[in-house]
Image (cartoon, rainbow, N blue to C red):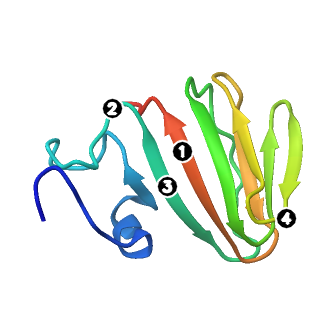
Amino acid sequence: MGSNWYRGNANDDGDANRGWLLGHFIEPADDVRSSKDVEVKWGVHPAGDKRAEWTKDDQRTTLLLLVQGTFRIDLTEGSTTMQRQGDYVVWGPGIDHSWEALSDAVVVTVRWPSAT
């Protein structure tokens, strides 16, 4: 593979960074997946998996996209359950969140900018 492209598998590659595939935390810094602009996560969650604690004052914008399953997102602004493939939620800086997989679920999360 060239230094300016990468081919991989989200299930395999995500293991190293809790599902995160792109972002500032990818090493080495010259890897094409290392970015200060955006973070991308592939999340595979069994039914009942949840983030009980809430994020604290995140100052990024986030997109959460449902690939399969049923997934609830709780925001300081309200809650919603995604059930249909392609359902998504976007929230901006200052909105905290937690979540729960109501059935086996796969979600893609995109955050920007990538926090350092």
Which residue is more in the foreground, 53 or 115?
115
Q: Which residue is mark 3?
A: 41
Q: Mark 4 is on which residue type?
A: Gln
Q: Hey, which quadrant is residue 89 in on the image? A: top right
Decide: marks 1, 3 in contact (CB < 8 A)? Answer: yes
Q: Tell me the CA gap for discs 4 and 3.
A: 19 Å
Secondary structure at badge 3 equals: strand
Q: Residue at x 74, y 53 (%)?
A: 99
Q: Which mark is residue 28?
A: none
Query: Taking 80 as reference, is 66 above or below it?
Result: below
On the image, the x and y values in percent for residue 43 come to: 56, 64
Q: Earlier in the sequence, mark 2 or mark 4?
A: 2
Q: Earlier in the sequence, mark 4 or mark 1?
A: 4
In the rendered image, which residue does mark 2 sit on? 36
Location of residue 75 in the rendering, given as x and y in whole percent from the top left corner: 79, 38
Q: Amino acid at mark 3?
A: Lys
Q: What's the amino acid at mark 1? A: Val
Q: Indicate the amino acid at tag 2.
A: Lys
Q: Residues within 10 Å of mark 4 (few under 14, many from 20)?
A: some
Sequence-first disc among 4 and 3: 3
Alpha carbon distance from label 2 to label 4: 31 Å
Secondary structure at numbered mark 4: loop
Q: Which residue is mark 4?
A: 83
Q: Earlier in the sequence, mark 3 or mark 2?
A: 2
Compared to residue 85, the image places residue 22 above or below, namely above
Residue drawn at (52%, 38%) of the image: 111
86 versus 93 height, above or below: below
| Label 1 neighbour load within 10 Å: few <14, some 14-19, many 20+ | many
Residue at which label 1 appears: 110
Quadrant in the picture for residue 107: bottom right
